[in-house]
Amino acid sequence: MERWQRTQERSGNALADDLPQILSTEGPHGPVIHAVNRAAHLAGVTVGARLADMRALCPRLRAEFADPERDRAALHRLAQWARRWCPWTAADDRPAGGMGGEYGLILDTTGSDHLWGGEAAMLAEMEASLSTLGFSARLALAPTWGAAWALARFGPVRAIWQGAGDLTPLPAMALRLDAETVLLLNRLGLRTIGHLADLPRLSLARRFSRAPPAQNPLIRLDQTTGHLPEPVSAPDPPPVFRADARLAEPIFDPTHHLPGLCTALCDQLAKAHRGARRLCLTVYRTDGEVSRIEAACALPSREAAHLVFLFRDRLDRIDPGFGFDLISLEASATEALGTRQVDLAGDTDTSLELSHLVDRLAARFGRNALTQFQPAASHIPERAEARAAPLAALPALVPVQTERPQRLLDHPEEIRVLYAVPEGPPAQFQWRRRSYRVARYQGPERIAPEWWQDRPGTRLRDYFKVEDDAGHRFWLYREGLQGDGRGGAPRWFLHGVFA
């Protein structure tokens, strides 16, 4: 929820703090609550409940769809960031105990707390650092993964392990069990971890003998108390793709070394089946100063010649000072890129040619000078696409097959027409002081107004594709119908031109 709120703030769409807001995901019987803000929590909205039920409880509830996959990706990046406190960190993105989308981080801080002034000081520093990123946190320190998980979610805001008695009053849900197992334990009268610990193990072993390990209360209890090991398996850090050129003497121009650096970097990317999306060229001057130049690709690439071109008009921005003796080229952002093959006819991939063109234009004029069109939710032609700036990437380069013209006028221009039939296209029209005689046509295609955003009285449109006797093709529409009660005679407009 907090990540979504920060995104809304950056886009200028932030809601007031007193408005209840939730994020939902699709459930078996409709949308269910995935995350809530503070106002929704105070209104009684709970994670995991059906959205329809919560709307009845809180009519002012605002709902948006969650993006769990993007949340998981952000959590894994945060786990890498948390390695500043200890080398063993992992993202806990497995929902357990009916906690819904409340994921977290697991850090094995054994031997690291003294570097931060003790356990309490380390937790305080973690809380402060996370707050600077816009995240609130419930922190707990315990000798096992399970105990820390339980205290962080059901203990005090900042909990430090004092003994096994800290777990006794916590609910059975704190053992990371699913909702069905917790419901069964509650029906048996086992509502807390203390109740489970006091019960003879033999009776529980018989009851849950066929349960999977992750939902076996005895196994979870032993993991929480340390009788069964549960080490933190920290993922490997992302690979670093970097090529260096160490020079015997200082130089002032890296141009001659750039092709070799790009070739070496592309070889590394090819072995990992990756392509560069963002590059950083760094020169280390003899006086200790560092200069950097960044470049980006519209699509992942590992073509050395193309990467060299991205820096061709940018190398003059480097201030060599008294010279530099180390040049480094690093792919700061990469994406998966398999082996490309031309089709059986020997044709090349046209999407690569377009992406190379975009990169060349961006290198020469700047990325802020380029824009791209993105589809918008509207069936009115001039509203069906929006201009996005600056151009950051080309997510899909697929030829578009459409019966509508690729070129639309910024604003439809009114034309003078001579009718052939009452409800058909014009036999002749005049546009920009030039007359065109219609030889053939196709249509009409009727487009109704969007009543939810158009003004009352907006008239419908009938679109025609027409071709004149010289072969020019146009996209015309008639606004309104004769006697529709929404104005006078219908008006004609030219909206697009076919190639």
Image (tube, rainbow, N blue to C red):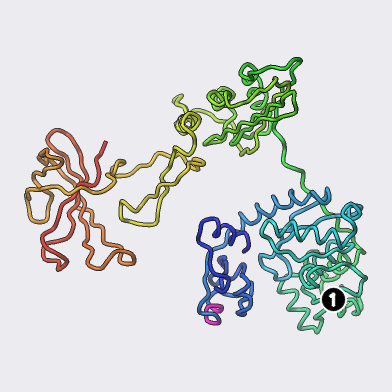
**Residue 18 versus residue 149: which sits nearer the camera?**
18
Instruction: Give yes or no for residue 138 being in the magenta stretch.
Output: no
Q: Is residue 372 left or right of residue 60?
A: left
- Location of mark 1 (residue): 193
Q: Residue at x 16, y 40 (%)?
A: 467
Q: Quadrant of residue 188?
A: bottom right
Q: Residue at x 7, y 52 (%)?
A: 421
Magenta range is 53-57
Q: Main secondary structure of the magenta part?
A: helix
Q: Quadrant of residue 433?
A: top left
Q: Position of residue 365 (x, y in %)?
A: 46, 31
Q: Quadrant of the C terminus?
A: top left
**Residue 212 versus residue 429: which sits nearer the camera?**
429
Give the crowd class for mark 1: few <14, some 14-19, many >=20 residues within 10 Å.
many
Q: Position of residue 349 (x, y in %)?
A: 47, 30
Q: Position of residue 53 (x, y in %)?
A: 55, 79
Q: Is residue 414 left or right of residue 8?
A: left
Residue 210 visible at all: no
Decide: is 302 above or below 32.
Answer: above
Q: Kindly state the secondary structure of the residue where label 1 is placed.
A: helix
Q: Residue at x 52, y 81 (%)?
A: 56
Q: Residue at x 82, y 51 (%)?
A: 85
Kind of residue at badge 1: Ile
Q: Position of residue 249 (x, y in %)?
A: 74, 15
Q: Is residue 411 left or right of residue 304?
A: left
